[in-house]
Image (spheres, rainbow, N blue to C red):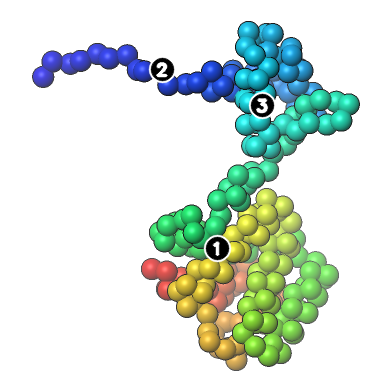
Amino acid sequence: MEEIFLKPIETLTQVDKIEKTLQDYLEKSNLQPGDSLPKETELAKSLGVSRTAIREALSRFRTLGIIESRKNRGMIIVSPSLFVNMEKIMTPKLLTEKTLKDIFELRLILEIGISEILFKRKTPESIKELEAIVNKEEHSANMAEFVKYEVDFHSTLYKISGNDTLLQFQKMLIPLFNHVYREYHLGPAVPPKNEGITHRDLLNTLKKGTPDTFRKKMISHLSSYLNAIH
């Protein structure tokens, strides 16, 4: 068959091109968070485009959390949140069943892999915080209370890690985690009574055990969830 050579069709709009040009400018100019951007009028003049087009392109950077407007300073570079846009789509109604299961599984993997960091960064205060949660959980009167303390316990583990990005990611996943938890009936109908590896077991291991032992017990603790999504 004779090979046909076709040139790609130009599909970028003017605003798309401006956005790409500004992105290249930000990368090559070595601007840091806190540095100011040129004014809209200066950018428009330099690129030979209208202020309206510049403004629309800059609005995309604002949406991404890369720039923001400051009084008396104009537009400045900021350090964006890694999950600023991801959080907006983290709703079960917008995600497929496969994606929901994948995200649920990702959170389980994170909780299994966090062991080494927990043992390095745990403190007497954080152990007391976990102890208080476990005491309340063991006396929970209904399933709603139990689920609350279940979430509190695992959230505190992320907090102990001292990794703000990991903690932010975990908080973002809680609504999806709860949805999959309910949708696939992963939890018990009533608060369990010391069945399998409990939070008390994990707490005691975090106090006196090793990262490897903690990891193995966490896998056992999460086994019902791991088995349910496969």
Mark 1 vs mark 2: which is more N-terminal? Answer: 2
* Crowd band around label 3 with a 10 angstrom C-alpha radius: few (<14), some (14–19), many (20+): many
Circle 3/circle 1 CB separation < 8 Å? no
SS class, disc 1: helix
Label disc, if present, on residue 10 of the rendered structure = 2
Q: Which residue in the structure is indicated by mark 3? A: 58
Q: Residue 78, percent across and down?
A: 75, 34
**Which residue is at 13% across, 15% downward?**
2
Classify residue 212 as left or right of residue 98. Answer: right
Disc assigned to residue 176: 1
> Looking at numbered disc 3 in the image, what kind of residue is underneath it?
Leu
Viewer-closest of 35 and 200: 35
Q: CA distance from mark 2 to mark 3?
A: 22 Å
Q: Is 93 left or right of 144, judged from the image as shown?
A: left
Q: Quadrant of the N terminus?
A: top left
Q: Nearer the viewer, residue 185 or 39?
A: 39
Residue 135 against residue 218 in the figure, above or below: below
Q: Where residue 221 sits in the image (x, y, percent)? A: 55, 77
* Mark 2 vs 3, N-terminal side: 2
